[in-house]
Amino acid sequence: MSHETSDLKVSITFEGTTVEFKGSAESVLHSVTEYLAKIIPTLDLAKKISVNYSVAELVKLFGDYVKITPEGPRVWSSERRFSDKEMVLLQLIGTRIAGETGKAQGDSLTLAEIASSTGINPKSISSRLSEVLKVGHVERQNSDNIVKYRITTAGINWLSGALSKKAR
């Protein structure tokens, strides 16, 4: 009777990362336990400090204020009055939702596109964009001499808070 020991091979795949452990059953068990003890608390901590709004979260937060129409994303609220800054950011939110769901070409707009879809004076939009660019709520993108604006995660967070305060 042979006393050969077979190597055990364990593969763990979690959130797109795969690790493999190979060796004696005892060493693999020790390695797997050690790996899980290290990675699980780290993942829990990372999830607690990570912010990335999914389309579902954006719709939940802003679905009462923006709609995707055949003409494109639009701010949609008859009973609420929004400031120009809120209107611009809501328009950019709608565009982001439309872009991420394939209903629009991208997730950013030119100043002229914002003016056309909101009806706000372009000079006022320019002033509001300047304000929100300074605080990081919007980012400017330059491509082929075309300037477009896109709402940032910080902008989404700020707008969500501002609108929830108004709703109280």
Image (cartoon, rainbow, N blue to C red):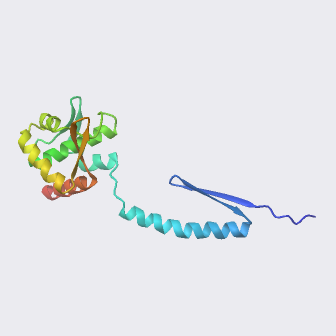
What residue appears at the point 23 percent right and 29 percent down from the top-left corner? 70
Residue 128 to residue 39: above or below: above
Q: Position of residue 16 (x, y in %)?
A: 52, 52
* Quarter of the figure with the N terminus: bottom right
Could you say which quadrant of the image residue 120 lies in?
top left
Extreme residue in the right direction: 1
Q: Position of residue 56 (x, y in %)?
A: 33, 47
Q: How many marks?
A: 0
Horizontal arrangement in the rendering, residue 12 relative to residue 146 (left or right): right
What residue appears at the point 10 percent right and 43 percent down from the top-left corner? 125
Could you say which quadrant of the image residue 36 lies in?
bottom right
Could you say which quadrant of the image residue 93 lies in?
top left
Horizontal arrangement in the rendering, residue 158 relative to residue 25 (left or right): left
Extreme residue in the top direction: 70
Q: Is residue 20 visible?
A: yes
Horizontal arrangement in the rendering, residue 71 relative to residue 15 (left or right): left
| 12, 124: nearer the viewer | 124
* Quarter of the figure with the C terminus: bottom left
Q: Is residue 81 visible?
A: no
Residue 158 to residue 28: above or below: above
Residue 9 to residue 34: above or below: above
What residue appears at the point 20 percent right and 58 percent down from the top-left corner? 161
Residue 20 to residue 141: above or below: below
Q: Position of residue 18 (x, y in %)?
A: 58, 55
Q: Position of residue 136 (x, y in %)?
A: 21, 55
